[in-house]
Amino acid sequence: MKGDFHEVARVWRQSSWQIKTYLALSAFLASGSIASLSETIFRWKGFVSDAVSFYQTYIAGQLQWLLERLFVHVPDGLSHLLILTAIYLGANLRVAKFALPSAEARSVALNAMTNYVGAAIGIAALFHSTARELEGDGALGLFLGSAFATSFAYWRVGGAARILWFVSLLAPFVIVGLAAAVMSGLVRTS
């Protein structure tokens, strides 16, 4: 843990404002007292609920609407699969492009992308061959399984690639949560 702290301190000067903001927010949230855990969970429950509702309405719902206008019938889970795939592949592309010249980090990124695309094609073929529709749970399962496996690989690689991976992977979720919180605050009447 001490090594991670020194790594963050070393990379801090060279980091973009997005990474600095994310690191500062993470440190602030981690400083919450364990004694007030139940209150924290109660507050976060509303935040997470607002974020999921915002995502369903304004992101996945709008993409689903657009896909249904372009194609005759689109399974409900396709919008979730496309969004999560964009996040996953985007995070790996950032590591492959911006990580320090580490052959190991680039290798992990390229292998992760190849495996994810192969698994996504395999799942789509399985659902098509069994005449079942892709649901959001299948897309989420693929994303979570791939993200956990890749996170472990980046954890082993270490260095800036690890930080870049986690920031790139988690930033879209944080942004959706913050946008939902702002929206919820703006429409709240009491």
Image (cartoon, rainbow, N blue to C red):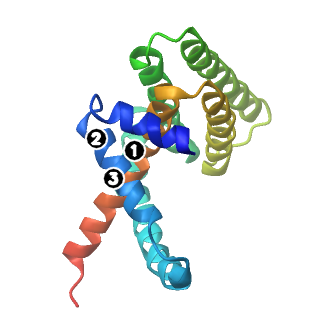
- Which disc, if any, is residue 24? 3
Q: Are marks 3 and 2 in contact (CB under 8 Å)?
A: no
- At mark 1, the secondary structure is helix
Which residue, given by chain and number where applicable, does mark 2 sit on? 18
Residue at figure coordinates x 45%, y 72% from the top left:
32
x%, y% of residue 120? 65, 28
**Quarter holding residue 81:** top right
Q: Which numbered disc, 1 or 2, marks the residue that appears first in the sequence? A: 2
Residue type at mark 2? Gln
Between disc 1 and disc 2, the foreground one is 2
Residue type at mark 1? Ala
Residue at figure coordinates x 30%, y 32% from the top left:
15
Q: Are marks 1 and 3 in contact (CB under 8 Å)?
A: no
Q: Quadrant of the N terminus?
A: top right
Q: Quadrant of the C terminus?
A: bottom left
Q: CA distance from mark 1 to mark 2?
A: 9 Å
Between residues 93 and 83, which one lies in front from this camera angle?
A: 93
**Direction from residue 88 to residue 15 in the image, left or right:** left
Residue at figure coordinates x 46%, y 10% from the top left:
101
- Which disc, if any, is residue 171? 1
x%, y% of residue 157? 61, 24
Can residue 54 be seen in the rendering of this structure?
no
Between residues 113 and 83, which one lies in front from this camera angle?
A: 113
- At mark 2, the secondary structure is helix
Between residues 51 and 103, which one lies in front from this camera angle?
A: 103
